[in-house]
C-alpha cells in the first residue's frame, strides 16, 4: 500500500485536477483510491461535482482517519455516505444532475 503526501520524497509527480481532465464531459461515477489524498482530489474536481453530481466510490482507511473530512465536505454538497464493505464507501448525491 503506497501513500502520497505533499512534500514527501524527492520524486516529482505531475498531478492534474479532475476538472481539467474531464473538461465539459458529463461524469456519472468516479472510483477514487488515492491513499490519503482524498481532499486534494475532491477540491480538484469540485466543478465536476457541482456540474454532474457523479456517484463517488472511495476507498477510505478508517484507521487512518480518512472518513470524516471527505464525508463532511461532500455532505455540504448534498451527498450521503453508504458503506459497501470495510474500506469502500459510496457517496451518492441526494439529487441527480
Image (spheres, rainbow, N blue to C red):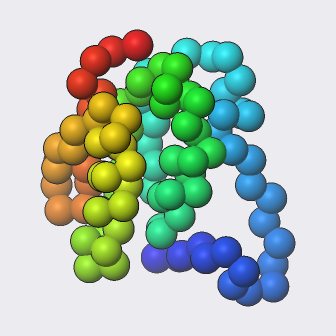
Q: x, y percentage for residue 53?
A: 42, 24
The quadrant in which the C terminus is found is top left
Judged left or right of residue 51, residue 76 is left
Q: Is residue 91 visible?
A: no
Identify whether 97 is placed above or below 88. above
Identify whether 93 is placed above or below 24. below
Judged left or right of residue 60, residue 29 is right
Q: x, y percentage for residue 47?
A: 59, 30
Identify whether 18 is placed above or below 52. below
Judged left or right of residue 23, residue 84 is left
- Image quadrant where residue 85 sits: bottom left
Residue appearing at x 29%, y 42% in the figure: 75
Q: x, y percentage for residue 30?
A: 46, 36
Residue appearing at x 30%, y 52% in the figure: 71
- Going by the picture, which residue comes out furthest to the front? 76
Residue appearing at x 74%, y 34% in the figure: 20
Identify whether 60 is placed above or below 73. below
Residue appearing at x 17%, y 62% in the figure: 86
Nearer the observer, 59 or 52: 52
Amino acid at each position: 500500500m503506497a501513500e502520497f503526501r505533499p512534500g514527501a520524497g524527492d520524486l516529482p509527480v505531475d498531478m492534474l485536477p479532475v476538472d481539467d481532465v474531464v473538461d465539459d464531459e458529463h461524469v456519472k461515477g468516479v472510483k477514487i483510491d488515492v491513499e490519503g489524498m482524498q481532499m486534494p482530489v475532491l477540491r480538484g474536481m469540485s466543478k465536476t461535482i457541482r456540474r454532474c453530481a457523479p456517484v463517488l466510490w472511495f476507498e477510505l482507511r478508517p484507521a487512518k482517519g480518512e472518513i470524516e473530512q471527505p464525508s463532511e465536505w461532500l455532505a455540504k454538497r448534498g451527498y450521503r455516505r453508504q458503506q459497501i464493505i470495510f474500506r469502500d464507501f459510496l457517496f451518492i448525491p441526494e439529487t441527480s444532475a
